[in-house]
Amino acid sequence: MTVTQDYIEHKFKEFNVLIFDGKLKPLPVRLSCARTFLGQLRYRRVHSLIGGWKFTDFQLVISRKLDMDERLLEDTVIHEMIHYYILSHQMRDTSAHGTIFRRMMTDINERFGRNISIRHRITDEESEKDMEVRRHLICVSRFADGSLGITISARTSIFCLWKELPCLPNVVECTWYMSLNPYFNRFRRSRTPKIYRIDKDELEQHLVSAVRLIKEGNVIRSL
Ligand SMILES: [Zn+2]
């Protein structure tokens, strides 16, 4: 479903009354283009007048780039509201998703039939829904044992990576491609020489329409 700021604000109000006894103050809601998280609570940590830390300047950020269904979107909002409840009440949890967080989450899941989890990262299933067409600069590295890995280069880093990737241990060959296939949206763009292991058949299947890139002096062009 399409995420709008109004919708998130509306859900925040609804869940604040229903789940959090109206104990959360309104906060700014922002939509983000991030593909690496569904939701995020942003805040600042400042020195408190009475010593220690105080959490302040909260913002609720929800990704609009991922096609979440309504349930997942609601669960994502509630997940961030639990963080907000803990931090805005200046409670100290054992970690980001510590004892207090887990207790509240379990309680809400049971009482309201929700399916909130502690993961923030994007699952494969969600990545598969990201179908926007973008240009990917892809280096396929072959390792000494015959397995393959890929690196999606940030546009500005291609010259660096072109030079550095072949120098990594066990890399015997690097081949570059340009592809518009949304399959590659799920990989984070690299500025540093890092390689994701990938299944050979899966990769070949998605590289079918890709264009080979070659480098001649200071120019990279399609073959
Ligand atoms: Zn969280």
Image (cartoon, rainbow, N blue to C red):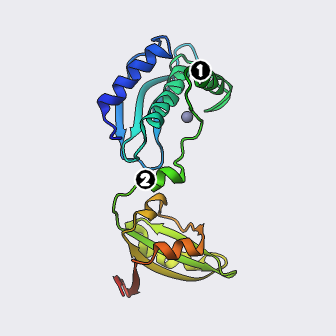
Judged from the image, the secondary structure of the residue bearing numbered disc 2 is loop
Q: Is residue 161 visible?
A: no
147 over 118 or under it: above or below: below
Residue at screen point 34% across, 58% down = 132
Amino acid of disc 2? Lys
| C-alpha separation, residue under disc 2 versus residue under disc 1 | 44 Å
Q: Quadrant of the N terminus?
A: top left
Residue at screen point 56% across, 13% down = 50
Report the number of numbered marks: 2
Locate residue 71, reporting x and y percent.
46, 34
Of 76 and 217, the residue lying toward us: 76
* Within-10-Å neighbours for mark 1: few <14, some 14–19, many 20+: few
Locate residue 189, reporting x and y percent.
46, 61
Residue 52's tag is 1
Q: Is residue 199 left or right of residue 32?
A: right
Q: Nearer the viewer, mark 2 or mark 1?
A: 2
Locate residue 112, reporting x and y percent.
55, 21
Q: Which badge, 2 or 1, is on the more N-terminal residue?
A: 1
61 over 103 or under it: above or below: below
The residue carrying mark 2 is 129
Q: Is residue 133 left or right of residue 101?
A: left
